[in-house]
Image (cartoon, rainbow, N blue to C red):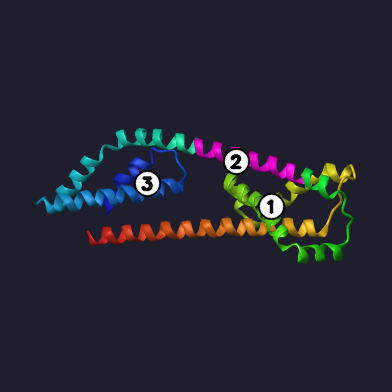
Amino acid sequence: MRSFKAYINKILNHIDAPQNVKEELAHEFMDHLLQIKRDKIESGYSEEKAIQLAKKEFGQSSELAPMLQKSITPFRIFGKVMTWILFGMYFTLLIYWFSNSISNYGMHDFNPFDDVKYLMLHPINVMAVIVGYGALSVFLAILFKSMRKFTLNLTMSILIIQLINTPYYVLHIRSFTMSGFIDQLGGFIIGFLIWSVVNYLSVILKRNRANKSDEQMKSD
């Protein structure tokens, strides 16, 4: 329904929000407007009059936009703050994990054959480590749009972990290990793949919802 689309766009143009949030609001508004229109037609109004009444009942765009902005902004800020807090907690635990692993296991000389053997004999420990590293890729993808590209995400994840390790390498507290690098690489890749799958499914669900709204518009 062109009339409803123009009406909804007029509201959303005055709202400062991410595109995905605007799309969700547009679908919700359209569903609500179409329902009001159907109710009015069932009550005996013509289609043209039902559209006018639906808009009037829904509200003026000049009144709705400020109200929606006030309701959206606090949640956006709260979501960003909570994500940064969780990332800070995760990063702190990650550094503690490195320090604790050093105190428990000490130095580990570079030996690729021993490292591969370790991976084969300790699959549960390896999986736990991979999950720990994978969380870094997920956080980066959530917090920074530029990190939603695989190569950039992987590169930044490796750099961050190596920066954490640098003081230990310089002070000869720990050394580079092939098993550690494989854990990190596997964790980063798996973490990014999980985020990508979840994000893809979210997009598919939104598209299906949009298609249903379009079908309802055509039927109405």
Location of residue 9 with respect to 73 vertically, above or below: below
Q: Residue 25 carries which label?
A: 3
Above or below, 122 against 56 in this view is: below
Q: Distance between the residues labelled 1 and 2?
A: 15 Å
Expressed as whole percent of the image width and height from the top left, the position of residue 48 reads 16, 50
Residue on which the image places disc 1: 133
Question: In the image, which residues are magenta?
Answer: 78-98
Identify residue type, mark 1.
Answer: Tyr
Task: Determine whether the residue tagged by mark 1 lies in a helix, strand or loop.
Answer: helix
- Locate residue 118, reporting x and y percent: 80, 62
Question: Residue 144, located in which quarter of the rendered image?
Answer: top right
Please name the amino acid that badge 2 sits on: Leu
Q: Is residue 163 left or right of residue 34?
A: right
Sequence-wise, the earlier of marks 1 and 2 is 2
Local secondary structure at mark 3: helix
Q: Could you tell me which residue is drawn at 77 percent across and 66 percent down?
A: 120
Main SS class of the magenta portion in the image: helix
Category of crowding for the residue at label 2, using alpha-carbon neighbours closer than 10 angstroms: few (below 14), some (14–19), many (at least 20): few
Discs 3, 2 touching: Cβ within 8 Å = no
Q: Quadrant of residue 100?
A: top right
Where is 57 relative to 111, above or below?
A: above
Residue depicted at 59% across the width and 39% down the height: 84
Q: Distance between the residues labelled 3 and 2?
A: 27 Å
How packed mark 1 is, by other alpha carbons closer than 10 Å (few <14, some 14-19, many 20 or more), is many
Question: How far from the left and from the top, in percent, is residue 193?
Answer: 60, 60
Q: Does the magenta stretch include residue 95?
A: yes
